[in-house]
Image: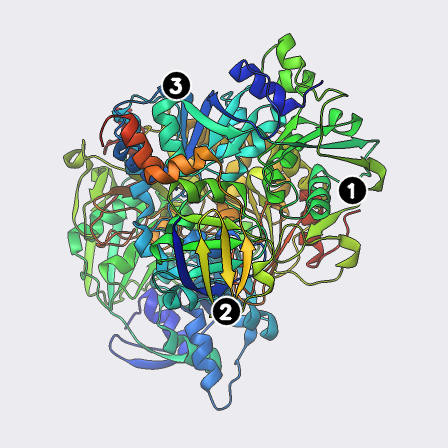
Amino acid sequence: MGATIIEKIIRNNTGKDVKPGDIVTVNVDRVMIHDIFIPFVASKFEEMGFQKLWDPDKVVLIYDHLVPASQVDDTRHFRVGNEFVEKYGMKNIHRADGICHQLMTEAGYVKPGNIVFGTDSHTTTYGCVGAFSSGIGYTEMASILGTGTMWVRVPETIRVNITGTLPKNVMAKDIILKLIGDLGADGATYKALEFAGDTVENMSVASRMSMSNMAIEAGAKCALFTPDEKTAEYCEMTLTDKERDLVGDSDANYCQVINYKAEDFVPVMACPSNVDNVKPISELAGKEIDQVFIGSCTNGRLEDLMAAAEVLKGKKVAPFVKLIVTPASRKIYTQAMENGTMEILAEAGAIITHPSCGLCCGRTGGILTDGEVVVATNNRNFLGRMGTSKVGIYLASPKSAAACAVAGKIVVPE
Amino acid sequence: MEKFSGKIWVLGDDIDTDIIIPTEYLALKTVNDMAPYAFSPLRPELAGQIKEGDIIVAGKNFGCGSSREQAPEIIKALGVKCVIAKSFARIFFRNSINNGLLLIENAQLRDVVSEGDQVTVTLNQSIEHNGNQYEIAALPQNLMDIINAGGLVKAMRKLNGLD
Amino acid sequence: MGMTMAEKIIAAAAGVSEVKPGDIHTVELDRLMSNDGTTHLTIDMYNKLKNPHIADVNKLVWIVDHNVPCDSVKTAASHKKMRDFAKANGIKFYEGAGVCHQVMMENHVTAGELIFGADSHTCAYGAVGAFGTGVGCTDYLYAMVTGKSWLLVPETLRFNLTGKLPEGVYARDLILTIIGQIGANGANYAAMEFGGEGLKTLDMSSRIAMCNLCVEAGAKTALMEVDQITLDYLKEHGREPKHSFKSDDDAKFAKVYDIDLSTIKPIVAKPHFVDSVVDAKECVGTHIDEAFLGSCNNGRIEDLRAGAAVIKGKKVHPLVRFLVVPASAAVYKQALKEGLLQIFMDAGAIVMNPNCSVCWGSCQGVIGENEVLISTGTRNFKGRAGHKDSFVYLASAATVTASAIKGEIATADMV
């Protein structure tokens, strides 16, 4: 009997053959804590009575939601974090380098086949390099910090095959939005998603990242891509046979198989106020907008900024419309300066902010009010996520978002 | 078997963590500081109305969204005895168990109740409403262990020989 | 009897041949600037008027700069009110283009104009020989509706500048030294006028930094003699002077100060007053949590160049948050082209979009309880940058950058 990718990762980790539904204890390869939760993790950790971290080198602390601080108490999180780092001898800390999920793979903390947990729901992102990664709460994080282990229920796997060539105006974001729309917001709850087919094989790691990032919006526990040469290049490593073998076997047991033809995809948006409320942009065209946000761990990467720049080159953002661009990391910001992307965005009138979670986490970065409409490239459009509950949030690809910024209304990208 | 009754508050499908507690309040110092803002994007008055021992009955995918553990902690801080929903999101489910907030899955109840009704829960067995019984599944043993220990913090304190 | 620059501008705006200090005149205003700090209040008052109308919409410039991008639902609502009103009435409107005074200097202000701004640092416009003064929203509304206002003619304090600033000393050190010397109310209601041979050594950016800060000595306005540097700046920005006024030789000044620029040293203004000015060396070693390079006072390309020169190839101290905030989109683009943003990013700085940032203390970059900020902003009042129990030191771009590297107050020669 063959195995799915997630079954193989758990098998490699525990040394036991596993099947969906089994409850097993795994050894954790890496954990990520972000600024919003560090005070809670620290206090739970001490309350639990632990004296030291199980392995300080495996713990990464990243300040991103609160950078730069927008409320006076935010800086308390930095202070608590800095004290924790000092007290327990941690080295892996990023205080202003970008969004946690971008940094975890970009800075080399996550490798194919790893098991990683983070105090953020979008921890599913690292499936882009073939790692089993999932979000947890701060209490559970505190227990991992002490024990290095965590119990998991082996999930069933939904296999998604995509073959063919994507239309020019379609990005990975459109695929994942379509999938979430088809599955529903709870369609993959407790399950693993596994992507395969020549379309995803031809995708950059950055595009795969957009997809694994959003898997949680269908409730998924994780979302996995088979590591390949692109992965190896991105992770600056040579793949071992074990890592190459992280592929879903043809006789593996899938609870559901979904097949898409790449040619069938069209640019879509997730409409207010659920991520699974997905419609083709052609059905929404003409709606006036107030703001566009390009950024986040979903779509703030270099290829996203470049896709936006391609649309914006030589054009201007529509009058009275704001375009806010928030690169996902310091490295991306720098690369975008070096290759001229930033200049194009700045000339078009974009407001380019420091790398951080920005508007996506709804604390600052472009908050809106009643009756306003925003087209955004991030991962959630929940009620009240970016201001009042009467703000309309439409999620889209960077290409679509940029086209809307120029038009001042919702349009299908060319 | 433990048995309890309570007045219910009824919510819909996909009650996400941003509804349970919006991000702008997450940096407040304590869960009690945050509790008044619970459910504010949807029903700003609700947090003030919920009384100790009340029960929330909701639709599918309750707690979807972020990993913010304040979500179950706040619901517990409001005095909610348990949440009965058609289904729960994964992270929220784990966070609730780890904090000792009881969650019960039941597919039928949400569609037959009205806000303000009384329901009676017999743990790991059934829910009674208007004379009708609705079966509920028992939780797996490893989760009952955490609940019986009084949450994950207490379980870990035990492990570290503190309690 | 001769007149000062301030008197000449008021006389021209009042349509009279002569004015003297203490006179009250009705004046025709050339331009009316308002930002997101108060415009929503102005609109509320406007909407309550019996016959609301705008005297000359071409005089109005509205700029969203204090909370950009918007950081709360409350400011989102006031921004929307401002945006909708500007759109409906055809008012020149900027959002995200930079700090209002810098945007005004780059795009609107010219020599000899009389300008009201609903912001205290409007006196910055004196750098090109315009009479700019800060007003509240009631005064602003009256001017918006009538095109006019009343003005008390101020006395003028004259500052004769000689010599040249030493290497590593900046206009900001100079103006803070002057404020320290005359005190926070040393120029109350008065105009501060700068001239002399020393002025010719100061570029436009330096002049803006100086005029901008004069309100911290209580000045009603600040003015600099129009010279070739002024005319070149205006020409470069596609504008002609309205009047190129200069004080008459027999003009009457309330007081004359002679300042030798070569004697100025790097300074620091200590918490919690702008006139608590000391030699920077006295503060060396003071622990800091955050450093801020930006604002209408010191966020221009020249300031970024000064900071970049100090930090190039070095790193920000790991425990310091170093905010670098270009004063306008034009400054941002220039800094991008010159590679300055690259230098700051490589050093670990937080490069933000053009906005008022922590200078205003209500948007991104605020500091917490007991934290210490060293800043190129305009003010160091108690609580200005965040928590009521926090501390702000003011210094030049070079000193601020050096401090960001060291994690404590330091001058540029120490890094």
Q: Quadrant of the N terminus of chain A?
A: top right
Is residue B13 or residue C71 the one in the foreground? B13
Instruction: Provide the residue designation for mark 1.
Output: A169
Identify the residue position indicated by label 2 in the image: B115
Q: Which residue type carries mark 1?
A: Asn
Type of amino acid at the residue the image marks with label 2: Glu
Q: Callout 2: 10 Å neighbours few (<14), some, many (20+)? A: few
Disc ID at residue C122: none
Side (left or right) of C118 relative to A401: left
Residues under labels 3 and 2: Cα distance? 51 Å
Q: Circle 3 sits in a helix, a strand or a loop, which is it?
A: helix
Q: Name the residue: 31% across, 69% down.
A: C3
For discs 3 and 1, the disc positioned in front in the rendered view: 3
Residue C138: give x, y in percent of width and height.
37, 78
The picture quadrant where one finds residue C141 is bottom left
Q: Secondary structure at mark 1?
A: loop
